[in-house]
Amino acid sequence: MSSQFPEARPRRLRRNASLRSLFQETEFSLNDLVLPIFVEEEIDDFVPIKSMPGVMRIPESKLAGEIERYARAGIKSVMTFGVSHHLDSNGSDTWNDNGLVSRMSRIAKDAVPEMIVMSDTCFCEYTDHGHCGVMHNLEVDNDQTLLNLGKQAVAAARAGADVIAPSAAMDGQVQAIRRALDAAGFTQTAIMAYSTKFASALYGPFREAGGSALKGDRKSYQMNPMNRREAVRESLLDEQEGADALMVKPAGAYLDIIRDIREASRLPLSAYQVSGEYAMIKFAAQAGAIDEDRVVRESLGAIKRAGADLIFTYFAMDLALAGI
C-alpha cells in the first residue's frame, strides 16, 4: 500500500450503528438521573413555569400521584424543593415537623417507599428576604445558619428523607448537619453535599420556579465561577467534614471542575444541570435551532464523560418516558 494512505483508521469502528454502539465509551441510564421537583403548598392545580417550558410547580395535594407516576416511568430518585407560603426571617417552617419540608418527604415516601427522596436543605425558598440563611447586619450569619441547617436536616430525616442535600453554601455546613443527624439518631441518613456551588447566572429560571424573594445576589457565599483551584478545595473540605457524596452545580459550563474533583476524590460525584441549562435547550429547540432529544443526550453524556456518577436534570422524566 502506498505510504500516502493512513495506516491508522479509527473510522473502521464507526462505519455502522452496531459498531458505534459496541465501542461507545460513555453511557447513562435512569439509574444515573435524579429529577428535581417543585412543590407548592396551598394551591389546587399545577402552575406552569414560563421560563422552564414543560416544568410545573406541583400542588402539594397532587404530590403523591406525581411520585407514583415518576416511579412507573422508572425514575428512582427525586430532589424536593418547596414553594412556601409561610415565610419569615429565619425560614423556621423548614424545621417544623408539620412544615412543607417535612410534608414533602413524608408524602413522597408514603406514596412510593422505594423512591429515594433527597431533601434540598436551604432557606432561600422559606425566608422573606430570599437569602440562604439568617441575616445579620445585611450579611448572612454563617454560624447561626449552621444551627438552623441542622434543625432542618433532622426534621427532613424524621419525615423519611433518605438523603440530606445542603445547598446553602455555608462554611462547615456538612459537619454541622452530620453532627445534628447523628445526635438525633439518624446515623444512616446520607449527605449529598452541594460541595462546589457557583454563583452562576444560569440559576435565573429557578427563581421563578421557587418563588424567590431575593434582592441582590449570593456572591459572598456561593463560589466565584472563575476559580478552579478553590472549586476543588471546597469539595475536599466537604469530604473531610463527612459528606457521603459531592456535587458540582451548574454542570455544563463546569466540566473541567467535574473532572478535577473526580480525579481528586473517590466519593460519588454528582452534577446539577440547572434551570438555565434546561431553558437554553428548550427555547433553542422551540426556535428550531437544535434537535432537543439529541442535544439533551449529548449534554448529559458530556457530564457523565467528565466524571459525574449522578446527574440532576429536569429532563429526567422526558428521558424516562422516551425509554431513554
Image (tube, grey):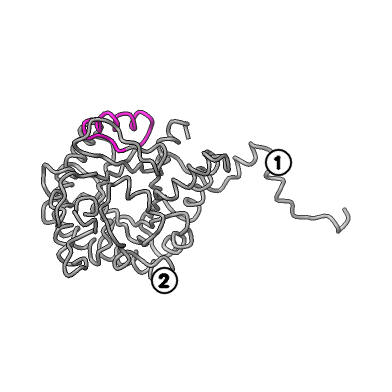
In front of the other: label 2 or label 1? 2
Vertical placement of residue 109 versus 130, above or below: above
Task: Write down the residue under mark 1.
Answer: 15
Q: Position of residue 198 (x, y in %)?
A: 37, 62
Dot 2 crowding, Cα within 10 Å, few <14, some 14–19, many 20+ = few
For image coordinates 26% across by 49% down, the residue present is 120
| The quadrant where residue 104 appears | top left
Residue 76 among magenta residues: no
| The quadrant where residue 84 appears | top left
Q: Where is residue 96 in the image (x, y as percent from the top left)?
A: 11, 47
For image coordinates 17% across by 62% down, the residue present is 134
Residue 66 among magenta residues: yes
In front of the other: 209 or 107: 209
In front of the other: 271 or 242: 271
In front of the other: 7 or 120: 120
Q: Give the range drawn in magenta.
A: 57-75
Q: Position of residue 216 (x, y in %)?
A: 30, 62
Dot 1 crowding, Cα within 10 Å, few <14, some 14–19, many 20+ = few
Q: What element carries label 1?
A: loop
Name the side, left or right, on which 96 lies relative to 257: left
Q: How many marks?
A: 2
How far apart in space, not on screen, are marks 2 and 1 (Cα)? 41 Å
**Sequence order check, earlier mark of 2 and 1:** 1
Task: Write down the residue under mark 2.
Answer: 229
Amino acid type at circle 2 is Arg
Residue furthest toward the right? 2
For image coordinates 58% across by 43% down, the residue present is 289
Vertical placement of residue 242 versus 84, above or below: below
Amino acid type at circle 1 is Arg
| The quadrant where residue 180 appears | bottom left
